[in-house]
Amino acid sequence: MPQFTNVKVSKVSEQTSLFEEALKPLKRAANIVNLEPDVVEVLSNPEQMLIVSIPVKMDDGRIKVFTGYRVRHNTSRGPAKGGIRYHPGVCLDEVKSLAFWMSVKNGVVGVPFGGGKGGITCNPKKMSEGELERLTRGFAARIAKFVGLDQDIPAPDVGTTAQIMGWFTDEYCKIVGKIVPGVITAKPLSIGGSKGRGTATGRGAFFATLEAAKTFNIPLKGARVSIQGYGNVARPIARDLYEMGCKIVAVSDSTGGAYNPKGMHPIELTKFKTRTRSVKGFPGSKEITTIDPITVDCDILIPAALENQITKKNANNVKAKLIIEEANGPTTPEADKILHERGTIVVPDVLANAGGVTVSYFEWVQNRMGYYWSDEEVDEKLKQAIHKAFKAVYQNAQQYQVDSSKAPQQSLMDLRTAAYVTAIKKIVDAMRALGRI
Ligand code: NAD
């Protein structure tokens, strides 16, 4: 039987720092809306956390034991929803932070879900397809009682793919003895995936960029774009911005980076990375490091890799006027403060990358109906959802503006706090309606 725990993890553990940092904007927003400290305490603790051991027979015949996690942060607005990450850095503290951000994100974009997240500490790049399949099936078997269509709905994240979602679905359906495609989202189309899900996070971030450019008068034609992390979420926005007339001047991945002030073609970059497994060495570019895209000369910066990339050490060197956070948690609270004081507009992760969960919600709805929408319908509904969420966040930023004597970007409340205010009000309303607080 898997071990269920809903106890608070000790703060003396060396792994609590990311979660502690993740709670800072919640505390800021809570002060603004005068939320009672007891309610903040409830929101500062995930509802449930499950840790499992997964023994996997490796190709060489050895058994290796992996650790997997699934955390439900808050389910007052609906079933928990959030991806599964396969990465060597996965730990309970990270999964708790990611689950918490999902509660906020789902509140910001208004999908009827709570927040959840999962992950396995592993290096998928060093595993064969067979090993990955056995790992995924083992994980699905161990968390099958914890997830479900009306309970907790996983999806991909860093290091996981549509194929991994397919294996997970198959194993889950065998265990429960039913066909339940909606237990997971971002599945392959052939087993109930939604049109547009593969590019949804990037597409949503693109719509958020259009909203920000219009709101803050930032011209997109000719704008220089720098992207850290050229993976699933980065490629679609690179293509869409390129088609709007932007120049992709810098990109990086975990192996290194490429810089060309004249611009690089996003499709060619994708082909090059598929062939060589790296963006490093892209023809015509100068080699840069994985972190350089954060500080190169550009107009729009898109962190699209991992958390804690913009810190107090490099925030003063960020040249971009606009940051679109495709990654979860790429900016530390200290860096956030520096950026706001310098007038840099940060469209926070909980809004900028909410396109993925929005189309996951559409997929879940389609699975429940057994009726499927066209690419155009999905894209239009996504555009409307991001437009509505951006407008609500911006209205809060204006309503709670900090100093009307300063330039517009500095007098507004930062968009992250405004987004947290938007989400917290909804989560707390739901908790009160359920009588949980
Ligand atoms: P991915 O694995 O497809 O891509 C991540 C990319 O980042 C890869 O190219 C990898 O090489 C690169 N990378 C890793 N470490 C790096 C480093 N130190 N410096 C530079 N590049 C580095 O993952 P993804 O699905 O594109 O997710 C990226 C981010 O977006 C994550 O923070 C994830 O939580 C977030 N996100 C993903 C989704 C989704 O739908 N996949 C939705 C919302 C948010």
Image: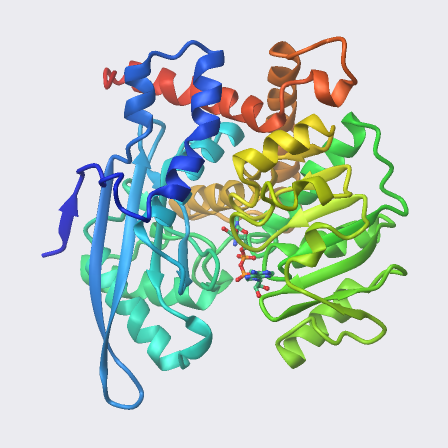
Above-or-below relation of 294 to 413: below
- Seen from the viewer's position, the closer of residues 15 and 304 is 15
Q: Which colour scheme is used?
A: rainbow
Q: Residue 279 location, x and y as percent?
A: 69, 71
* Residue 149 visible in the current orientation: no
Is the N terminus in the top left, top right, bottom left or bottom right quadrant?
bottom left
Above-or-below relation of 97 to 26: below
Is the C terminus in the top left, top right, bottom left or bottom right quadrant?
top left
* Snapshot quadrant of residue 354: top right
Q: Which residue is drawn at 28% across and 59% down?
A: 68
Q: Which residue is drawn at 76% across and 63% down?
A: 266
Q: Residue 147 location, x and y as percent?
A: 26, 49
Above-or-below relation of 134 to 341: below
- Seen from the viewer's position, the closer of residues 419 and 320 is 320
Q: Residue at x 60, y 54 (%)?
A: 233
What is the number of callouts on the image?
A: 0
Q: In this view, does 274 lie to the left or right of 38?
A: right
Q: Is residue 425 left or right of residue 418?
A: left
Q: Which residue lies furthest to the front in this view?
A: 313
Q: Residue 305 location, x and y as percent?
A: 57, 55
Rendered-image quarter of ligand 1: bottom right
Q: Residue at x 42, y 53 (%)?
A: 155
* Snapshot quadrant of residue 207: top right
Q: In this view, does 91 lie to the left or right of 240?
A: left
- Seen from the viewer's position, the closer of residues 125 and 241 is 125
Above-or-below relation of 432 to 98: above
Q: In this view, does 95 lie to the left or right of 141?
A: right
* Residue 248 visible in the current orientation: yes
Q: Residue 290 location, x and y as percent?
A: 64, 62
